[in-house]
Image (spheres, grey):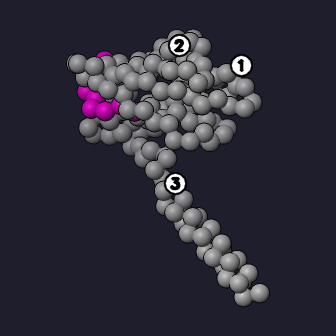
């Protein structure tokens, strides 16, 4: 009886510790942004999308190949006009189902106006899934989040 009570107590304590650790680490999954732009109505499955940044500059973002598949290498590209940019990341998250941390850093391509990188999407057991690709733009003054939605799969 005492042994079972100790085992039950140890399991409850381990679950409590796990819960506290998960609670403390959860903010790392959501980027802290200074400016969140509205979700674009542009369809990344059909074309590159353009967004106007708060400083008046423009960002063009694309994912290839199109339509965007799961489980295949994806080429992500962001280019900027009229804005100085230091760093670009793309947070890829399922809108209806958590699919894990997926935030590739895009590398500057020479002039600091074009950034590119690779990523892939996990497969969803339902066949198709809605994703949100949030481009995180660090211009040195603020972290700007530019969200786009698209569907991958069947």
Confirm whether the magenta stretch covers residue 82: yes
Residue located 63% across and 36% down the image: 95
Look at the image and tell me whether residue 135 can be seen.
yes
Which callout, 1 or 2, points at the residue further toward the start of the chain? 2
Which residue appears farthest toward the right when viewing the image?
A: 1
Place of residue 8 in the rendered image (x, y in percent of width and height, measured from the top left): 70, 77
Q: Which residues are magenta?
A: 80-89
Residue located 28% across and 19% down the image: 109
Left or right placement of residue 119 versus residue 142 in this view? right
Mark 3 crowd level (few <14, some 14–19, many ≥20, 10 Å Cα): few
Residue located 66% across and 73% down the image: 12
Look at the image and tell me whether residue 147 can be seen.
no
Give the Cα separation between the discs numbered 1 and 2: 15 Å
Confirm whether the magenta stretch covers residue 102: no
Place of residue 85 in the rendered image (x, y in percent of width and height, measured from the top left): 28, 29
Secondary structure under badge 3?
helix
Secondary structure under badge 1?
loop
Secondary structure under badge 2?
loop
Give the Cα separation between the discs numbered 1 and 3: 31 Å
Q: Quadrant of the C terminus?
A: top right
Which residue appears farthest toward the bottom when viewing the image?
A: 2
Are the residues flagged by discs 1 and 3 in contact, CB closer than 8 Å?
no
Disc number for residue 26: 3
18 and 55: which one is in front?
18
Kindly identify which residue carries mark 1: 154
Place of residue 23 in the rendered image (x, y in percent of width and height, measured from the top left): 54, 61
Which callout, 1 or 3, points at the residue further toward the start of the chain? 3
Kindly identify which residue carries mark 2: 65
Q: Nearer the viewer, mark 2 or mark 3?
A: 2
């Amino acid at each position: 009886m005492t042994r079972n009570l100790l085992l039950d107590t140890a399991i409850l304590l381990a679950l409590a510790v796990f819960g506290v650790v998960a609670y403390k680490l959860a903010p790392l999954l959501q980027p802290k942004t200074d400016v969140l732009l509205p979700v674009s109505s542009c369809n990344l499955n059909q074309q590159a999308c353009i967004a106007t940044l708060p400083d008046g500059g423009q960002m063009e973002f694309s994912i290839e190949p199109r339509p965007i598949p799961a489980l295949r290498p994806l080429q992500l590209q962001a280019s900027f006009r009229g804005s100085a940019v230091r760093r670009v990341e793309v947070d890829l998250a399922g809108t209806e189902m958590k699919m894990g941390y997926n935030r590739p850093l895009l590398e500057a391509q020479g002039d600091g106006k074009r950034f590119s990188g690779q990523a892939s999407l996990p497969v969803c057991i339902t066949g198709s899934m809605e994703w949100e690709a949030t481009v995180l733009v660090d211009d040195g003054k603020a972290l700007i989040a530019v969200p786009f939605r698209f569907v991958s799969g069947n």
